[in-house]
Amino acid sequence: VDLELAREESEKLETMVRGYVGGKTWSEVQDAMRGGQTDVADLNREKLTICFCDLVGFTKMSSRLQPTDIASLLNDHFARLFNIVRAHGGTIDKFIGDAMLAYFPEPVEAFLASKKMVQESRTVRVGGEFTLPIQVRVGLNTGEVTLANLGVSEYRQRTVLGEAVNFAQRMQSSAPPQAVMISEDTMRHIPHTMIRTLEPVRVEIKGRRDPVEAYVWTQSTERRDEVSDRLAIRSSLLSGQARTSLADRLKRRE
């Protein structure tokens, strides 16, 4: 009985801790423990796609709400983002105020997740009593980052560091409302068929002397792609019908 109770308590503790440190960090902690280590490996270098997402006009919005309502609003919003990131193989690094920092091993999955963040960010529930309209800005950048343990022995945080992270945040802050700003480094890894109607824009970036090229995705871009697809299919069908008609006429002449 004591062993069964201890196992149940251990499972409860694991569930609680996972909710605070995140799935990836918890897996790394478990791997370290199995290997007889007392710490998670520090300063791992990886190539990842970094995603920043924040709420537009949050400061003004929160000034009209009670603290409990602000917490309810953010929790509803973050739950939606968490499900999207997890569904696309990403990891939440942290929530910072009204913003989220996440990273993905695959740039395409990061792009698909970012689009969904915009598409599904329309309203949030506040305390189960009413909803508020919201808009988000999302920024993506791909590059080498360092996964580091920051803090002291009593309190540490595992997070991504590097210029690629800073640049992703610059992309996000430069994005229009309800849009994804995508860096050139991320665009190189996305198939052309997914981004064929995106046009480059010149973006002023703090700390950079010259503007940089980036690409903006909005839902109107998606609709443009759908129209383009329908027109291409229609053109192909009409072309096929024309060829069939010509072949029939030639046969009749014979």
Image: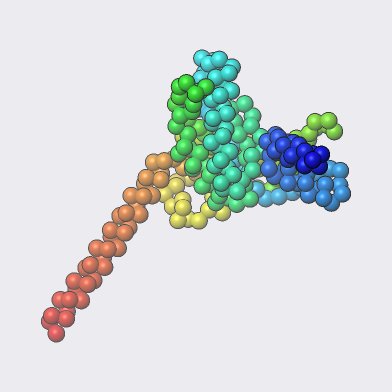
Residue occupying the far bottom of the picture = 254
Q: Is residue 76 above or below residue 116?
A: above
Please tell me which residue lies in front, 8 or 137.
8
Q: Give the camera-side residue of 56 and 72.
A: 72
Residue sitting farthest toward the left: 253
Residue 99: x %, y % from top left:
59, 31
- The image quadrant of residue 244 is bottom left
Question: Which quarter of the rendered picture does the C terminus lie within?
Answer: bottom left
On the rendered structure, is 220 left or right of 204? left
**In the rendered picture of this protein, how many numbered marks are placed on residues?**
0
Quadrant position of the N terminus in the picture: top right
Residue that appears at 54% across and 25% down: 73
The residue that appears at 32% across and 54% down in the rendered structure is 230
User: Which residue sits at x=56%, y=54%?
Assistant: 189
Q: Is residue 179 left or right of residue 247?
A: right
Question: What percent of the width, then of the height, locates residue 247?
Answer: 20, 76
Q: Would you say 13 lies left or right of 112 here?
A: right
x and y percentages locating residue 88 in the rendered image? 56, 48
